[in-house]
Image (cartoon, rainbow, N blue to C red):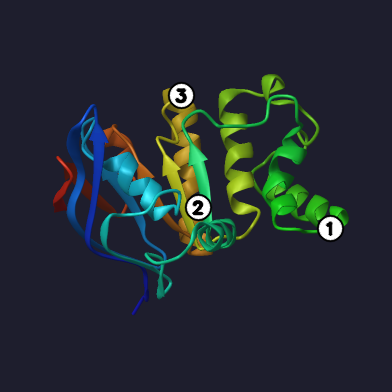
Amino acid sequence: MAAALIEIRDLRKVYALDGVEIQALRGIDLTVDEGELVAIMGPSGSGKSTLMNILGCLDVADSGSYRLRGQDVTPMPSDQLAELRNREIGFVFQGFNLLPRTSALENVETPLIYGGMGKRERHEQATEALQRLGLSDRLHHLPNQLSGGQQQRVAIARALVTRPSLLLADEPTGNLDTATSAEILTVLETLNRQDGLTILMITHEPDVARRAQRILHLRDGRLEAHR
């Protein structure tokens, strides 16, 4: 039986906007086991991004609890959250978020620099990650010399290079055409199936969500239903 990687109980988050309180999350309960591939869907303003930011330790909840691999994340100070984030969580974004004047290899090395890894070891680890994503002939290309699909593969390699236990993908196919989107989803499915990597992805597209093992629906800050 798989162990729980993520355990959330009664998670709540409120923002103040022009003096008005906006309840972004209204008591979320969620468990995600190790090795799951889960899609989170919902309309704009439903709380998806807020939930993703809290799961990624980029933001903290106002109340409730969040445990990652059994660790209670809720009371952690910002420096401890940053350390946990760098060690346990990889991020893939719709806009790729690559450094524009930096090669594919150097982009992938970036998280390892923050982790204090030596130059030779991080070079080897980043090269291996890019080769695995089918980019062995693109190591020294700049982002503007790569197609959208290649840029997203570089972004995935960068997310994986620290060997995280959780991959958070925010609209990972949002800037890609249909054929390239299918390729990226196949990459994510392979990482999930072969490596047992736990993946949570936000998407507005039902066809993308159906590639997941489970679909969560958020509406008005509440988890409505799931498959």
Residue holding disc 1: 118
Q: Position of residue 95 (x, y in %)?
A: 51, 28
Residue at x 82%, y 50% (from the top left corner):
123
Marks 3 & 2, CB-CB < 8 Å contact:
no
Task: Quadrant for the C terminus, please.
Answer: bottom left
Foreground tag (1 vs 2)? 1
Q: Nearer the viewer, residue 124 or 83?
A: 83
Q: Name the residue type under label 3.
A: Asn
**From this viewpoint, which residue is outermost toward the front?**
19
- At numbered mark 1, what does the secondary structure look like: helix, strand or loop? loop
Q: Position of residue 68 (x, y in %)?
A: 41, 67
Q: CA distance from mark 3 to mark 1?
A: 34 Å
**From this viewpoint, which residue is outermost toward the bottom?**
1
Q: Image check: 169 left or right of 126?
A: left
Q: Say the numbered circle drawn on residue 190.
A: 2
Sequence-wise, the earlier of marks 3 and 1 is 1
Residue at x 40%, y 68% (from the top left corner):
34
- At numbered mark 3, what does the secondary structure look like: helix, strand or loop? loop
Badge 1 crowding class, 10 Å Cα cut-off, few under 14, some 14 to 19, many 20 or more, is few
Residue at x 40%, y 75% (from the top left corner):
70
**From this viewpoint, which residue is outermost toward the right?**
120
Q: CA distance from mark 1 to mark 2?
A: 29 Å
